[in-house]
Image (cartoon, helix red, strand yellow):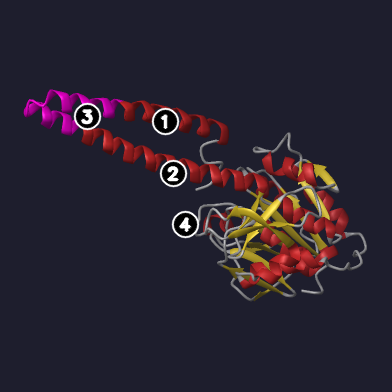
Amino acid sequence: MDQIKSVIVVGTSAGGLQALSQMLKNTPESMDAAIFVVLHVSSHSTGNILVQHLQKQTSFVCRIPEDGEAIQGKHVYIAKPNFHMLLKRGIIRMIKGPHENRWRPSIDVLFRSAAANYNSKVTGIILTGLLDDGTSGMIAIKRCGGTCIVQEPDEAEFSDMPKSVLNHVEVDYRVPVSDIGYILDDMNSQPVNPETIVPDDIRIEDEITEKMNSSIDSLKKIGTQSNYTCPDCGGTLFLINRKDSLLRYRCFTGHAYTEQLLLDKQSEALEDSLWITIRRMEERKNLLQAAAKHLEELNHEGLKAEKLEQAEDINIHLERLKMLLVSLSIKTGSNNGFE
């Protein structure tokens, strides 16, 4: 692996297959590099169809790597669905650790591990996609002396991911996807960048992900304890110390969120709780109405009226809750691209 001139990591989400295909089609066959790709797909996908499709676009060998596989040049390694892909010196790790940014594989995990282990030899590329997975990873690549390339948001099918990177990172290239291959070719003809020292916080986060858990001591080295709890496991969240403008949180288990994704996750949890409340209130309303009918049969008109009044009060609250749920759905979106 050390003989390979550069490590190229690519992250994309919605609309990514077409963008990846175009990028690989224009990537020069002579380039001395290994390419690693995270594309957000269903956790139930095998990934084989993606490999077959991308193989038609390039002479590089396209494959889904095994855990511990040696890195080879002129290969395109595609993350296995439902597994994080990490890079170590000379090998690829495939692990089933906690979700980061609600995804596994996570673009941030790949990018951060590349930056921690190959620093200035890394080129990060963000293509079309929803939300902001990959932004933190691009920040790590930039801080370690690597090169950052972003697809022009105006041409991206979904511009969230490119725009998020541009809002937080001073990128080296902002170009149409059709130009990325030519940029990579030009970079390949330039001298190798000198290695840089990896910041401690990037190295520690990479180690946390690989070990699939963290201690309070390791989290204290990179963050401060917050008053919030992890929406996935209920553990305490730590606010990662800011080396940039992106707010992020991480728990002991290993779940990690940007501020926006944490807000989205909390909104979903709130919505779930409200639906449970609505179901239970509907059951109580129906039971009160059934009780009123039974009292009517017994000629207890006073008690019947009391039960119906209680049922009507519940119905009023139900309508208000349903209006609140509609408002929440409009403000946060339906599923934001997640499964």
Magenta stretch: dominant secondary structure:
helix
Q: Does the magenta stretch include residue 46?
A: no
* Element at label 2: helix
Say the numbered circle drawn on residue 44. Answer: 4
Q: How far apart are marks 1 and 2 (CA)?
A: 12 Å
Question: Rounded to the nearest whole Å, what is the CA distance between mark 3 and mark 2?
Answer: 26 Å
Q: In this view, does 95 lie above or below 151?
A: below
Relative to residue 251, is residue 217 depicted above or below?
below
Task: Kindly give the residue lying farthest to the left in the view shown.
Answer: 298
The residue sitting at 89% across, 68% down in the picture is 195
As helix, strand or loop, the secondary structure at mark 3 comes to helix
Q: In which quarter of the image is residue 7?
A: bottom right
Residue type at mark 1 is Lys
Q: Residue at x 87, y 56 (%)?
A: 187
Res 198 seen here: yes
Question: Which quarter of the rendering shows the N terminus?
Answer: bottom right
| Distance CA(mark 4)–CA(mark 2) | 27 Å
83 horizontally vs 326: left or right: right
Residue highlighted by disc 1: 322
* Disc 3 from disc 1: Cα separation: 23 Å
Sooner in the amino-acid sequence: mark 4 or mark 3: 4
The magenta stretch is 289-312
Q: Contact (CB < 8 A) between labels 1 and 2?
A: no
- Within 10 angstroms of label 3, few (less than 14), some, or many (20 or more) residues? many
Q: Are marks 3 and 2 in contact (CB under 8 Å)?
A: no
